[in-house]
Structures are given as C-alpha cells and as structure tokens.
Image: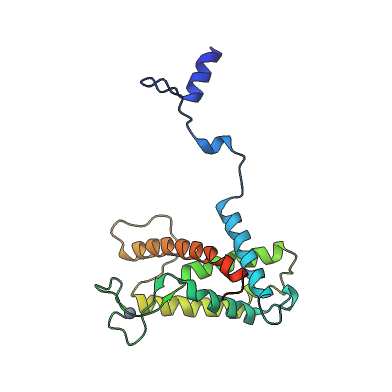
Amino acid sequence: MSSNKGKELLAVDESSGSVVVPDQRQQQPRSLSRYESQKKRDWNTFCQYLRNQNPPLMLSQCNYNHVLEFLRYIDQFGKTKVHLYGCIYFGKPDPPAPCTCPMRQAWGSLDALIGRLRAAYEENGGSMESNPFANSNIRIFLREVKEGQARARGIQYKKKKRKIRDGNKAGEGIRSNRKQSTCSFRYFQNNKTKLQEGLF
Ligand SMILES: [Zn+2]
C-alpha cells in the first residue's frame, strides 16, 4: 500500500517510465513572498538613493520632499507612455502610431511602491508619526499623477474590483498598466548596479 502512495506522489509517466516531479517548488524551502521581496528591494533602493545624495542623507533626516524627489528620479526608468498636452494622441487610449512623448512610471506602480516603502519604513524602526511616505503631500502628489495620467492616456482608474466584466475597456487598461508596472520596476532593479556605481 505504501509503495502505491509513493508512486502517486512521484507521478510516474507510464509511457516513458520516467519520474515526473509534480511541482518543483514544493521541494525548495519557501522563500519570501513576492510582495515581501519586492518591498525589501524597494527599501534597499531607497536607502541607496539617500546614500548617493550629496551630502548623503540619514534616514532620520528624510522628509516627504526627499520622497517626492525620489519619485521624480525614478520616473526616468518608467515604461508607460504619458502624452503631453500638445501631442495629437493626448487622451487617446490606443494611439495608432508612436510619438515622441516621454515614458513615465505609471501611477499604479508609484502608488504600490509608496505603500511598500511606507510599510518598510516602520518595519525598519521609523515611527508612524514621522513616516514621510504617509505624509499627506505624497497622497496629493499621487492623486495628481493619477488624474493627469488618466487624462493623458484616455483611461479611467477604477477602484480595485476582483470581478472585471468582460469587454470592460477600462478594466483592460488597468490590467495592461499593471503588467507594465512590473516590467518597469524590474528594469529599474536591473539598473540599480549602475546606480550603486554612481553613474546616474
Ligand atoms: Zn504622445
């Protein structure tokens, strides 16, 4: 009986006789969740950014202005096309041709980033009262980015809903936007080596 159980677990491929491992991940120790590891990377990036300032900034000196500067700094690594006022595609969700408008960090990725850094700040000993990521000026900044990008890209950000109706154009916009956010941040992480070397 026990040998049958073993066979089930290893899922022997009858045709070839080779042993198929059902799920490789089960064999490895469970590492940090995606959110936790992303939060750790973001936090390291932010601390590195503070150290690269001239003169280097201590975390205790950090206020919401430094956070806003950091957000403007990482904007250059964005992968989301945000049309300028003069562009003929301003407010058009699916431009038929490329334009010269800049690539920016999508609002969704900035919003998620701030959420992770806000949590990391307190987990790393910062007090809730002095948390620069929780400052109302950051919330105002993010709201302006959200509204500006919604106008420029011709999309509406809706409140998070698990169920998105089929054929809901706005929902699709958010989903594709999310995909871009992940990529842009991965891109940013790849460039962190250069950041550490002080090339930026
Ligand atoms: Zn454009």
Residue appearing at x 50%, y 75% in the figure: 75
* Farthest left residue in view: 96
Residue appearing at x 35%, y 86% in the figure: 85
Residue 77 in percent (x, y) is at 48, 72
* Farthest top residue in view: 1
Image-based side of 139 in relation to 103, left or right: right
Quarter of the view holding residue 171: bottom left
Residue 118 in percent (x, y) is at 63, 67
Residue 78 in percent (x, y) is at 46, 71
Q: Choose between 80 and 132: the one closer to the eye.
A: 80
Coloured how?
A: rainbow
Quick one: quadrant of the C terminus?
Answer: bottom right
Residue 14 in percent (x, y) is at 38, 19
Q: Choose between 67 and 103: the one closer to the eye.
A: 103
Classify 2 as above or below 122. above
Residue appearing at x 59%, y 70% in the figure: 195
Classify 139 as above or below 190. below
Looking at the image, in which quadrant does ligand 1 appear? bottom left
